[in-house]
Image (spheres, rainbow, N blue to C red):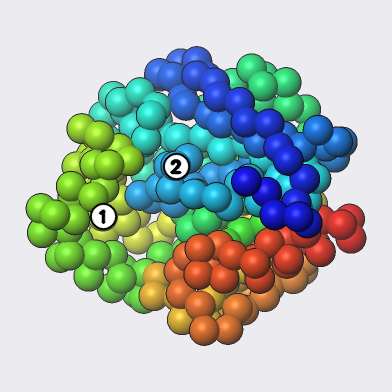
Amino acid sequence: MPTPNEAPVTETEWMIQTAEGRLYAKSWAPDSAIAAPIILFHDSLGSVDLWRGFPQRLASETNRRVIAYDRLGFGRSDTHPGQLALDFVAAEARDAIPPLCGQLGVTEFVACGHSVGGGMAVETAARFPERCRALVTIAAQAFVEERTLAGIRAAKRDFQDPANVARLARYHGGKARWVLDAWTETWLSPAFADWTLDRALAAVRCPVLALHGDRDEYGSSTHPERIAAGRGAARLLPDTGHVPHRERETLVLDAIRSFLSGL
């Protein structure tokens, strides 16, 4: 239920047909929404459901339609046919966004992503400069940093506990092990070590807001600084880890609302 300061929103679900399989998508639309919708890109273990109440609040407080979807292989989307390609971050903008926008009737949008989803939002803004009106990243990585790899190695050890995999399966079902391996084995692969967002960032033409926690275990403040450099603002959130929209939800919502209202 919305708070007294939040407008009610209408929730709608879709299955989006792509060349490789169907994607589950959900939108939250305020009755009076008129500005470009916000597309949310989830993190490496994420899904629509793992955004929890954030999309609804974001829609209500920004008065914009918010669209979230499960990437192929995640959540309620179809099973991924194989392993993630090394260009999977850029490939998301190329392969998923056109059918998503086409089937949901989206022409212009704001790209907003968490963690690796932030990288996908960057790639989307770069690929569709005439359609992307703004870019927001939350705890995104711009390159492969040792701090990122150390965090992933620690998480991989934690997931040796079957109970942790079982918790992941609540959101991904039988795809949980694939989701976990797609994250850890891709990022820890020596072949992925030279990945960066530099080329995509050079092509971004819209205003940028890069949010990052000062205690983020998967990346230093170098990431938001690189993402925002010459393009917008980097904001370091105090006493915050890798999931700012859950740890500091109101602060994140306020920052995004203020950023978008100033466009």
- Tell me which label, 1 or 2, sits earlier in the chain: 2
- Dot label at residue 57: none
- Residue tagged 1: 184
Q: Position of residue 258 (x, y in %)?
A: 81, 64
Q: Quadrant of residue 63?
A: top right
Measured along the vertical axis of the image, is residue 209 above or below residue 118? Answer: below
The residue carrying pointer 2 sits among few (fewer than 14), some (14 to 19) or many (20 or more) residues within 10 Å by Cα, namely: some
**Helix, strand or loop under label 1:** helix
* Amino acid type of the residue that numbered disc 1 sits on in the rendered structure: Thr
The residue carrying pointer 1 sits among few (fewer than 14), some (14 to 19) or many (20 or more) residues within 10 Å by Cα, namely: some
- Residue tagged 2: 49
**Helix, strand or loop under label 2:** helix
Q: Position of residue 146 (x, y in %)?
A: 34, 74
Q: Position of residue 244 (x, y in %)?
A: 53, 67
Measured along the vertical axis of the image, is residue 215 above or below residue 137? Answer: below
Q: Quadrant of the C terminus?
A: bottom right
Measured along the vertical axis of the image, is residue 257 above or below residue 251? Answer: above
User: Which residue occupies 83% across, 37% down?
Assistant: 33
Q: Position of residue 90 (x, y in %)?
A: 52, 42
User: Which residue occupies 27% across, 42% down?
Assistant: 170
Give the total number of marks visible in the rendering. Answer: 2
User: Which residue occupies 24% across, 65% down?
Assistant: 155
Q: Is residue 193 among what the camera can see?
A: yes
Q: Are marks 1 and 2 in contact (CB under 8 Å)?
A: no
- Out of 190 and 161, give the one closest to the viewer: 161
* Mark 1–mark 2 distance (CA, rounded to whole Å): 21 Å
* Amino acid type of the residue that numbered disc 2 sits on in the rendered structure: Asp
User: Which residue occupies 65% across, 67% down?
Assistant: 250
